[in-house]
Amino acid sequence: MGITIKDIARMANTSIATVSNVIGDKPGVGKAKKKQVLEIIKRTGYRPHRSARSLVLQKSAMLGFVVSDLSNAVYVNVFRGVESVFRKRGYQVFLADSEMDGAKERDNIELMLDNRVEALVIIPVHEFKLGDDVVHLIKLHQEGVPFVVMGRLENFEGDFVTSEETRSAARMAQHLMGLGHTRIAFVGEDPDNRAAVERYLGVKRAVESDSRAELVTVRCPANSSVRRWASTVDSVLRMPERPTALIMVNDITAITAIQRCKAVGLGVPEDISVVGFGNLMTASVIEPALTTFAENVPGIVNKIVEALTRKIADPQCESIQSLVPQKMLRRKSSAPPPRRIKIL
């Protein structure tokens, strides 16, 4: 980990504010102490990020919100919730869409910081591209920039807030096994998508804990076209030993699965159960209504606001890493397995 302003303050036996004043060439620091701090900075090779420096030295009543993909309704609702709270506190909240482009994400963050926002909420592209570089986020944390990630990063010690995907997925599998399903498919395993990875892990653990149950794993990238998802579901439905329940990686794909089941003459849930994750608006109106897990947006907003408030007050405070439980919505798309498997 790189040298931080907190480390410089500790080595100089002084406060972070004093080090900040030295970096910013502000008055109020004695010559001897200023010399000591500058010598430590030179010896350690510490390089204060220009934006981190502006964050430490002044308050702007501005926040930045950098989102990986504004087409995601959950992210829009989280932004609205955070913006509403901070607007009442006199803040302006600026929004930037990275459009699933890591380079654009880095540019958006730099632009926000160059305009002296006090803190950031970042929903990283890494959530959907686990191979995407996150060095810039780790570096921001090391530099003491106040920010909160909505999501989860490997080797990241800063603040993050995310939904409890693994436990939710395990509960979904347990729900189906409780109905009597013993051959269950997880459709949408994708090693490059964090939510897909965690949901698969939860389902796998739950199924493996029941000696009677068997898991069929079907890989399909989360960003696949509707046509590819339809083809993937068709291949599952035509398996010689067809699963009696499909756990789809999200609601969009679950709705596609219900449509494909109907197209080949299978009733949902009479012949096969289908479940998803996300609770899209259409999940409750499709026929049959979809069993799913709902994101706890108010809970996510509350945790982000809590973390931001702490970081604005003290950028060096201990980080909080929050997993927000989701709510299961049992609807008509899941039921006990059929007594007789319909042959296609």
Image (cartoon, rainbow, N blue to C red):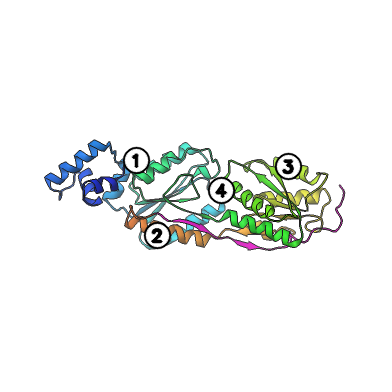
Q: Nearer the viewer, mark 3 or mark 1?
A: 1
Which contiguous range is marked in magenta?
319-344
The percent coordinates of residue 128 (x first, y second) are 55, 43
Viewer-proximal residue among 92 and 67:
67
Residue 325 pos. (x, y %): 55, 60
Q: Nearer the viewer, mark 1 or mark 4?
A: 1
Q: Which residue is mark 3?
A: 232
**Which quadrant, please, contains the N terminus?**
top left
Q: Is residue 331 magenta?
A: yes
SS at mark 3? helix
Reply yes or no: does residue 218 show up in magenta. Answer: no
Task: Assess disc 2: are there few (<14), some (14-19) or many (≥20) residues with their C-alpha within 10 Å of its C-alpha.
Answer: some
Q: Label 3 sits on what residue type?
A: Thr
Q: CA distance from mark 2 to mark 1?
A: 32 Å
Residue at 42% in and 59% down = 305
Label 1 to label 4, Cα distance in Å?
36 Å
The image shows residue 162 at horizontal and vertical percentages of 51, 54
Whichever of labels 1 and 4 marks the residue nearer the N terminus, that label is 1
Q: Is residue 280 visible?
A: no
Residue 330 to residue 225: above or below? below
Q: Tag 1's secondary structure?
A: loop
Q: Which residue is mark 4?
A: 71
Which residue position holds label 1?
Answer: 2
In this picture, residue 37 sits left or right of residue 77: left
